[in-house]
Image (cartoon, helix red, strand yellow):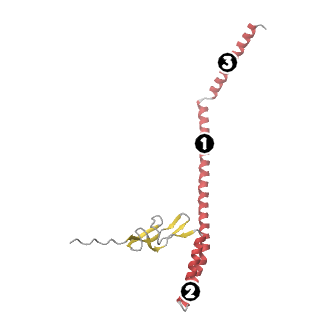
Amino acid sequence: MSDSEQNGSNQNTGETAEAHAERAEAAEQQASTPEDKLGEAQAEAARMREQLLRTAADFDNFRKRSRREVEEAQRRGREAILKDLLPVFDNLERAASHAESAPDAKSVAEGVRIVTKQFVDTLDRMGIKRIAAVGKPFDPSVHEAIQQLDSTEHPAGVVIAEVQPGYMLGDYLIRAAMVVVSKGSPVEPAPAAN
């Protein structure tokens, strides 16, 4: 085959490939009529809607499951605390019934001290600590000042009395201590000049 024949053959092949591509494009355009495009868009919208509904249902189920798990954890926490506190309550009831028939106040006081220690030990096991107050500098993050008094024994800003104890659970404040804070020494009026 001569070079000119081969070039002619390549031209025919090139034209044929171009014609084939044009025919494929035309066929694709014919298949993609506006109605077909609308149908495809509607099908895609339906798929997306279904996916959205499934996602919303999954999220709703997750939210409900999470709420149930939190409620269950809270219930178990309350149950554990009550199991620790009920023996203290039982002993308080025993002390109260014993107080009615006790011949002396000393035995009742001793019983109350024992129950108080049991309660403090129970709180300690739970990680609940009493806030130190008396003799400490006033700290508004853990103390609630209910009164200020003049004091010659304590400098200003120091807690001189605890009205109600405060408690912490780890770093979390359960209840601030209600305290009386020193204002320091009273200022004596200057003598009048004559």
Q: Which of the two discs, 1 and 3, labels the residue nearer the N terminus?
A: 3
Residue 78 in the image: x percent, y percent? Answer: 59, 69
Q: Nearer the viewer, residue 75 or 98?
A: 98
Residue 41 quadrant = top right
Residue pictured at 55% horizontal, 86% vertical: 108
Q: Which mark is residue 99?
A: none
Query: Where residue 132 sits in the image (x, y, percent)?
Result: 50, 70
* Sequence-wise first label, 2 or 3: 3
The residues bearing labels 1 and 3 have C-alpha atoms spaced at a distance of 38 Å
Q: Which residue is mark 1?
A: 48
Residue 147 location, x and y as percent? 39, 71
Give the number of the disc on residue 97. 2
Few, some or many residues within 10 Å of mark 3 (<14, 14–19, 20+): few
Q: Residues within 10 Å of mark 2 (few under 14, many from 20)?
A: few
Q: Is residue 45 left or right of residue 11?
A: left
Q: Earlier in the sequence, mark 1 or mark 2?
A: 1
